[in-house]
């Protein structure tokens, strides 16, 4: 009986033609590009710029409005974190960490427009591994540039050769540090991608559940719709902000490690 149920479930998936992760692909100079991810990313950039312009327009040295107050609280939290970990030189990272958090948060909020269909009209671009990977590589490159500026070329090389073990274990130090540096952008990208992609996957499973078990019921479609709403609220207002915060926080921690001197490390 259990096997028959699985067969029925798989047949229902084929019948309703629900897929996850399909993209509208175009080729530019022979290179495939996900068009839906590109326009969703562009839309997120436009929203972030618009938010910045609104803050600039409403900014005042007197009593701040609600929007300015929220913005100042967010920036203040980032400045406090950087000041306590890196010190005054960490203030240069405040715009980067804040911009990453706001951009990823806005991009994650696009999850509310997805409905578990084959193509998302304005789906979260962070659910496509290409954008999280690009953000992770961008952050890691800046982290290494900051490390070279802080330690100098010699100190930068010595860090990878002489940490964490003594000098005679230099090959082991180099191997461990290289693995760590390669793992940083990979884990940073996959953490964000996996959590956002799982949201689309859950919508697909909920839709499949409706087609499999709830569809024949008189109120099956209503229940499926309610399940979608509950999951969307959980995904958009809990998972999305948490993942944006984690990405920004890890960025700060990576800069903290890269800009510390040998004695501090």
Image (tube, rainbow, N blue to C red):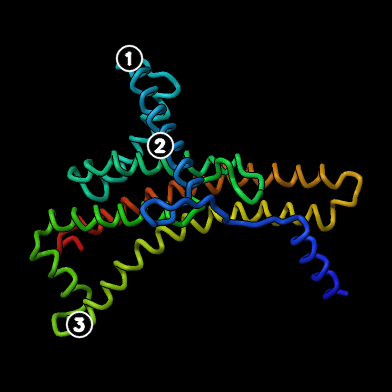
x and y, in percent, of residue 160 in the image: 19, 71
Which residue corresponds to mark 2?
Answer: 45
Q: Which mark is residue 62?
A: 1
Q: Nearer the viewer, residue 24 or 69?
A: 24
> Are there few (<14), some (14-19), or many (20+) residues within 10 Å of tag 3?
some
Q: Residue at x 58, y 41 (%)?
A: 121
Task: Give the number of the mark in front: 1 or 3.
Answer: 3
> Are there few (<14), some (14-19), or many (20+) residues within 10 Å of tag 2?
some
Which residue corresponds to mark 3?
Answer: 171
As drawn, the residue found furthest toward the front would be 29
Q: Are marks 1 and 3 in contact (CB under 8 Å)?
A: no
State the SS at label 1: loop
- Whole-Å distance between the Cαs marked 2 and 3? 43 Å
- Whole-Å distance between the Cαs marked 1 and 3? 58 Å
State the SS at label 3: helix
As drawn, the residue found furthest toward the bottom would be 168
Q: Give whichever of discs 1 and 3 has the lower sequence position.
A: 1
Q: Residue at x 68, y 54 (%)?
A: 204
Residue 190 left/right relative to 87: right
As drawn, the residue found furthest toward the right would be 218
Residue 167 left/right relative to 83: left
x and y, in percent, of residue 59 in the image: 34, 19
Quadrant of the rendered structure where residue 257 is?
Answer: bottom left
- Whole-Å distance between the Cαs marked 1 and 2? 29 Å
State the quadrant of the N terminus: bottom right
x and y, in percent, of residue 253 in the image: 31, 54
């Amino acid at each position: 009986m259990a096997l028959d149920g699985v067969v029925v479930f798989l047949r229902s998936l084929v019948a309703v033609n629900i897929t996850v992760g399909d993209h509208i692909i175009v080729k530019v100079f022979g290179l495939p590009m996900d068009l839906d991810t590109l326009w969703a990313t562009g839309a997120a950039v436009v929203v972030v710029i618009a938010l910045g312009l609104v803050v600039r327009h409403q900014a005042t040295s007197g009593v701040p409005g609600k929007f300015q107050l929220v913005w100042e609280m967010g920036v203040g939290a980032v400045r406090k974190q950087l000041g306590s970990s890196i010190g005054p030189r960490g203030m240069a990272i405040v715009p980067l960490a804040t911009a990453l958090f706001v951009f990823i948060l806005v991009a994650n909020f696009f999850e509310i427009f997805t409905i578990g269909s084959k193509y998302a009209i304005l789906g979260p671009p962070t659910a496509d591994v290409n954008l999280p990977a690009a953000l992770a590589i961008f952050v890691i490159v800046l982290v290494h540039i900051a490390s070279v500026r802080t330690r100098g070329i010699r100190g930068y090389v010595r860090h990878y050769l002489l940490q964490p073990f003594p000098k005679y274990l230099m090959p082991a130090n180099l191997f461990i540090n290289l693995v760590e540096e390669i793992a940083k952008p990979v884990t940073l990208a996959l953490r964000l991608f996996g959590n956002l992609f799982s949201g689309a996957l859950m919508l697909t499973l909920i839709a499949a559940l409706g087609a499999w078990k709830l569809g024949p019921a008189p109120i099956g479609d209503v229940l499926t719709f309610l399940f979608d709403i509950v999951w969307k609220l959980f995904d958009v207002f809990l998972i999305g902000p948490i993942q944006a915060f984690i990405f920004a926080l890890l960025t700060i921690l990576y800069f903290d490690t890269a800009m510390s001197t040998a004695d501090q490390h």
